[in-house]
Amino acid sequence: MSFETLGLAAPLVRALADLGYTTPTPIQSEAIPVVLTGRDLLATAQTGTGKTAAFALPILQRLFIDTAADAQAVRGPRKVRVLVLTPTRELAAQVHESFRDYGRHLRVASTTIYGGVGMGPQLDALRRGVDVLIATPGRLIDHIQRRSVDLSKLEVLVLDEGDRMLDMGFLPAIRTILEKLPTRRQTLLFSATFDDPIRALAAQFMRDPGEVQCAPRNSVANTVTHRVHPVDAERKRDLLIHLLAADSRRQTLVFARTKHGSDRLAKQLEAAGFKAAAIHGNKSQNARLKALRDFKDGRITVLVATDIAARGLDIDALPCVINHDLPMVAEDYVHRIGRTGRAGAEGLALSLVSPEEGGLLRQIQRLLKQDVEMVPIDGFAPSRPIRMGHDAPMPQRGRPSGQQTPRKHPRRPHAAPQRPAHAGPKGGHGQGRREGGGQGERPQGRSGR
């Protein structure tokens, strides 16, 4: 199958070819035809499989056809015809970038509005008029209250990362926004999971939606190798430095549990000679975007993040994710690890686990429905074994530290092939659990977003 056979217009196919994409991913193959019919859609897919393109491409197709049919449509200030709601600023920026990339040969205007930056440029863009508006809920409500955005001509609403919206408490804000939208519209709900609350949300404001599900609940790519390195909590930093030093040029995303801890860890890594930066909810938006840009461009090789980055960071071919601290909720492990092993590429997920985190590890293994390989590192063995309930020590698959350096374990065989050079376009999504109210933006429409 190709993008031409999906019925996409020549300018879109050309833009995809410019970007090196010729073959749609499964979610794109299934979702694009449904969206093109104008039907509501409830869709989920494993992260990194191209959800953004699955809705951006058919939306751009619709705008292209309508504009070609009515030459007057490109004259005068544009009205917002498409609204994409995202839970985080980073995701809003990435979705906007995707719309610009895919629509580079079309006369479609788009902009993004989110908190953490000044209102001035956003007001200017809205005055000039846009076809596609990508927004976070809180800042959009700010603009609605200021009457600086007109949504009366809206034709398509997209809720991106619907599950994350619910997790972050945005349901009241979503309802407020829905009251301002035309009832006759196409609604698309994309999510990383298909939990019951998502279905309940869809039932409230969608009309007989089609359903596309390309991944089981809480699944991770089968191209990811999971590995646990047991270590005492106070020696985690030293073990992390040891692991990073094995390949200092490898791009690595490191997860810490707290904002203060991520800042401290990034500074310690810099002191050890690594090019590192931290990203979390207390960072200014400009600082967060710069850190992400530097990481993508290779100017830094280690990005230390809280769960604000568990979803929504679309980083091509990220080889390794390291959990310096295990997440408090097992589902967040899936979202963290979703940054690697994307679109058929191999990935490595390492977790530094202290004896106190045995219960968290047990929850993760239950969610994954598999044991996670444990490999002690010589010189870093913990002072006591990791127990996962019922006083049972965690089974070890490597040799105990002190006997000899553990041999390398081969990757598990997997069915998914390596990502071809011209696979379908990707679109990362969402993000992780709130960090005490400091990450992303707050659910209510207050100033300062």
Image: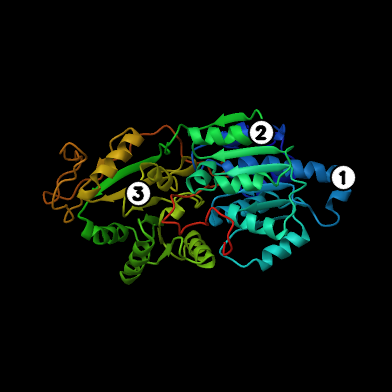
Q: Is residue 230 above or below residue 240?
A: above
Q: How many marks?
A: 3
Q: Which residue is mark 3?
A: 327
Q: Position of residue 359 (x, y in %)?
A: 25, 43
Q: Which residue is mark 1?
A: 70
Please report the residue visible at 49 percent of the width from the left and 32 percent of the height from the top.
196
Residue 268 placement, left or right of 387: right
Q: Could you give the CA–CA distance between mark 3 and mark 2, rounded to whole angstroms?
A: 34 Å
Please report the residue visible at 31 percent of the width from the left and 53 percent of the height from the top.
325
Q: Could you give the CA–CA distance between mark 1 and mark 3, rounded to whole angstroms?
A: 52 Å
Q: Amino acid at mark 3?
A: Pro
Observer-side mark, 2 or 1, equals 2
Circle nearer the N terminus (3, 2): 2
Judged from the image, the secondary structure of the residue bearing numbered disc 1 is loop
Q: Amino acid at mark 1?
A: Asp
Q: Amino acid at mark 2?
A: Asp
Label 3 packing within 10 angstroms: few (<14), some (14-19), many (20+): many
Residue 233 placement, left or right of 174: left
Judged from the image, the secondary structure of the residue bearing numbered disc 3 is loop
Q: Position of residue 176 (x, y in %)?
A: 63, 47
Q: Could you give the CA–CA distance between mark 2 and mark 1, rounded to whole angstroms?
A: 25 Å
Dividing the picture into quadrants, the one containing residue 421 is top right
Please report the residue visible at 19 percent of the width from the left and 38 percent of the height from the top.
395
Image quarter where the N terminus lies is: top right
Label 1 packing within 10 angstroms: few (<14), some (14-19), many (20+): few
Q: Nearer the viewer, residue 11 or 381?
A: 381
Q: Is residue 200 visible?
A: yes
Q: Which residue is mark 2?
A: 40
Observer-side mark, 1 or 3, equals 3
Q: Nearer the viewer, residue 296 or 195?
A: 195
